[in-house]
Amino acid sequence: MVLAVITVAQFPELKLLMPLTAWVVIWTLTLLPAITPWWARKLGVVQ
C-alpha cells in the first residue's frame, strides 16, 4: 500500500493504481487465511 501511495504521488496519471492496490490487499487479508487450511491439506503439509 505504501509503495502504491509513493508511486501515485510521483506519477499522478496512475491514479487507478490505488483502487487496484486496495482490492489486492483486501483479497489477500480475507481470502488467503480462509483457503490456507484447504491448500495445506491438498498439498499434504498437514494431515
Image: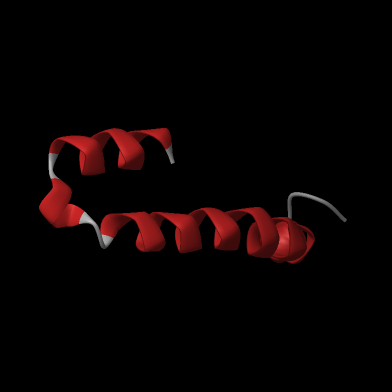
Residue drawn at x 26%, y 63% as measured from the top left = 16
Is 44 located above or below residue 11 in the figure?
below
Residue drawn at x 73%, y 56% as measured from the top left = 33
Residue drawn at x 72%, y 57% as measured from the top left = 36
Who is closer to the viewer here, 42 or 24? 24
The answer to whether residue 3 is left or right of residue 10 is: right
- Quarter of the figure with residue 41: bottom right
Is 40 located above or below residue 3 in the figure?
below
Who is closer to the viewer here, 33 or 17? 17
Which quadrant would the N terminus be assigned to in this image? top left
- Quarter of the figure with residue 28: bottom right
The answer to whether residue 37 is left or right of residue 28 is: right
Question: Can residue 35 be seen at all in this image of the molecule?
Answer: yes
Question: Can residue 39 be seen at all in this image of the molecule?
Answer: no
Count the labels in the image.
Answer: 0
* Residue 34 at x, y percent in the picture: 75, 64
The answer to whether residue 1 is left or right of residue 31 is: left
Outermost residue toward the right?
47
Residue drawn at x 15%, y 35% as measured from the top left = 10
* Residue 2 at x, y percent in the picture: 41, 34
* Residue 25 at x, y percent in the picture: 52, 53
Is 27 located above or below residue 25 in the figure?
below
Which quadrant would the C terminus be assigned to in this image? bottom right
* Residue 29 at x, y percent in the picture: 65, 53
Q: How is the image coloured?
A: secondary structure
Who is closer to the viewer here, 17 or 39? 17
